[in-house]
Image: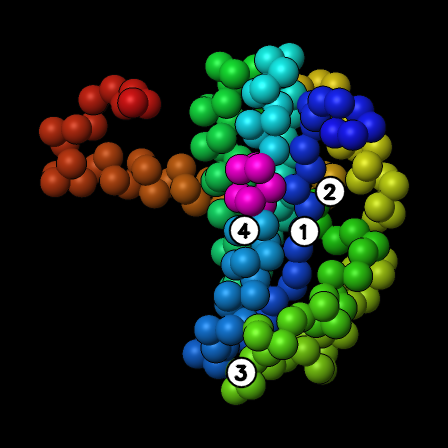
Amino acid sequence: IARFKKIHMVVNNAGVGGDIGPIDAQDQKGWQWALDVNLVGVVYGAKVMTPLIKQHGEGGWILNVASMAGMGGVPYLGAYTATKAAVVALSESWAGELEEKGIHVSVLCPAFVQTRIHESERNRPAKYQSGSAQRLDEGSFANSTKQMVENGIEVSIVGKRVVEALEDGEFYIFTHPNYHAVMQQRNAAIDAAFIKSAESPLLQHIVNQKFEMP
């Protein structure tokens, strides 16, 4: 603000990998770490910056960084997956809420990028240390994750893709088109579940009701 006087663009980009392991072996501290950084950090960023964008009345943009993991579950990464899915849902909510204020919202969902997300343990504060969790950080799972991150796309490509997408007004911003088939499978499963629900005798009284957002 001191330099540019006004804020028009906010990028909420904090993220940690969280604990890796089966759900029955993870403790609350590991979950809280992932929630506080990946989700609450985004909430705080938007809460602080949105009033500053509204203040000048010229509109603006909020970009929330989620993940492809937020578009579908990843085994043994429950905390990370859940927080990134929440960021996607929050972005969808805020987009409808802020549109009338001239503030656009987009959500970035990259897959593997050459960051140090697989080394986020180095930044874990003492209060979030998981003393009893059975972890899979060592071994084939962690090694394969490390390899995929190191072989991911360059950060600069992600940045250029974001600029390209914002210029086109995209809400969902994807960086890995090779994941499209996976998303199609998930969407097909959801579509099939809706069709199945429409066949239920219990739900016939609402089958033809038009849904409208409040």
Question: Residue tagged by mark 2?
Answer: 176
Q: Are marks 1 and 4 in contact (CB under 8 Å)?
A: no
The kind of secondary structure element at disc 1 is loop
Q: Is residue 171 above or below residue 23?
A: above
Q: Can you give x and y, in whole percent of width and height, for residue 9 in the image?
A: 70, 28
Q: Which of the marked residues, 1 or 4, is nearer the chain's N terminus?
A: 1
Residue at the (17%, 28%) spot, across then down: 206
Quarter of the image where one finds residue 126: bottom right
Residue 108 seen from this side: no
What's the CA distance linking mark 2 and mark 3? Answer: 32 Å
In the image, what residue type sits under mark 1?
Ala
Question: Residue tagged by mark 4?
Answer: 39
Q: Which of the marked residues, 2 or 3, is nearer the chain's N terminus?
A: 3
Q: Which of the marked residues, 2 or 1, is nearer the chain's N terminus?
A: 1
Q: Magenta part of the protein: which range?
A: 42-48
Residue at the (20%, 22%) spot, across then down: 209
Image colouring: rainbow
Q: For the residues carrying marks 4 and 2, which lies nearer the camera in this image?
A: 4
Quadrant location of the N terminus in the rendered image: top right
What's the CA distance linking mark 3 and mark 4? Answer: 21 Å
What's the CA distance linking mark 2 and mark 1? Answer: 20 Å
Question: Residue tagged by mark 3?
Answer: 133
Residue 209 in magenta stretch? no
Q: Which mark is residue 14?
A: 1
